Image (cartoon, rainbow, N blue to C red):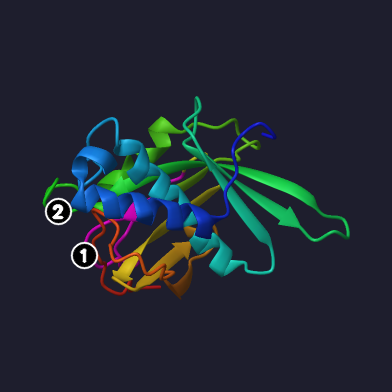
Amino acid sequence: MARRQWKYPEDGLRELQAVSFFSQILPQIGGSRTWRREPFKKYLEEFQAALFSYAIKQQAPDYEWCYSYGELVDYDCVLRCQLPSNGGGLVYKPVQLKELVPEGLSAESSLQQLIDKLPAKYTGTRGQENLVVAIYVNRATDINFQQLKVPKMRVQQLWFYGFLDPSNCFLLGDILNGVGRYDFPYPNFSLGASMPNTATSTCPTGS
């Protein structure tokens, strides 16, 4: 883990917003405006990693959080948490990033369909599950936990996150161990550009 490049989530979001600015005014430099084509897809994926780590930081602000993006064999990024010095140390969590894409890209897809595929894809050894799955909800939708069915899966944690509106975000989870909801403002870096392919979700509902 020590040889990976680590970033504070705010730094990652700031860097990516600068790249987004060039993507929208000079696509030939910053890549496609949506970041959905190679070789620029990595920017969209790192944005998701940075936003998720920033969301986790808002949920647990007393700890120092960093992330390292870069796909390995079984996961897309790693979160690192610095525990308090009295008995602390560094804790690492591998994260698999998933996205509920905008309706314009796949109208038939749903959060339920995305969740239903997880148990077959991620099969950690019983008792040694340490993978975190983070689903970026990138469309306007309701999340009703009275209707959503979460199957048993061999991952340690499952989180949903996304935008409530262009200035505010949400984090829901850990879904597997009791749902908590955390709303927080998206940091404003005053670069004059919004992130590409971000859709707002309506307020999650249900218990």
Seen in the picture, residue 154 relative to 205 is either above or below; the reply is above
**In the figure, is residue 158 to the left or right of 63?**
left
Q: Which residue is mark 1?
A: 140
Give the residue type that dot 1 points to. Ala
| Residue drawn at point x = 39 percent, y = 39 percent | 118
The magenta segment is 135-152
Q: Is residue 84 magenta?
A: no
Can you see residue 115?
no
The total of numbered circles placed on residues is: 2
The quarter of the picture where the C terminus appears is: bottom left
Give the residue type that dot 2 points to. Glu
User: Could you say where residue 112 lies in the image, as x and y percent from the top left?
Assistant: 28, 51
The answer to which image quadrant residue 145 occupies is bottom left
Q: Which residue is mark 2?
A: 103
Residue, far right: 86
| Residue drawn at point x = 26 percent, y = 31 percent | 38
Of 112 and 91, nearer the camera is 91
Looking at the magenta stretch, what is its main secondary structure?
Answer: loop
User: Could you say where residue 111 lies in the image, as x and y percent from the top left?
Assistant: 28, 53
Of 50 and 113, nearer the camera is 50
Q: Is residue 139 magenta?
A: yes
The quarter of the picture where the N terminus appears is: top right
Residue, far top: 73
| Residue drawn at point x = 50 percent, y = 24 percent | 73
> Which dot marks residue 152?
none
Badge 1 crowding class, 10 Å Cα cut-off, few under 14, some 14 to 19, many 20 or more, is some
Callout 2 secondary element: loop
Q: Are marks 1 and 2 in contact (CB under 8 Å)?
A: yes
User: Could you say where residue 14 lies in the image, as x and y percent from the top left?
Assistant: 44, 58
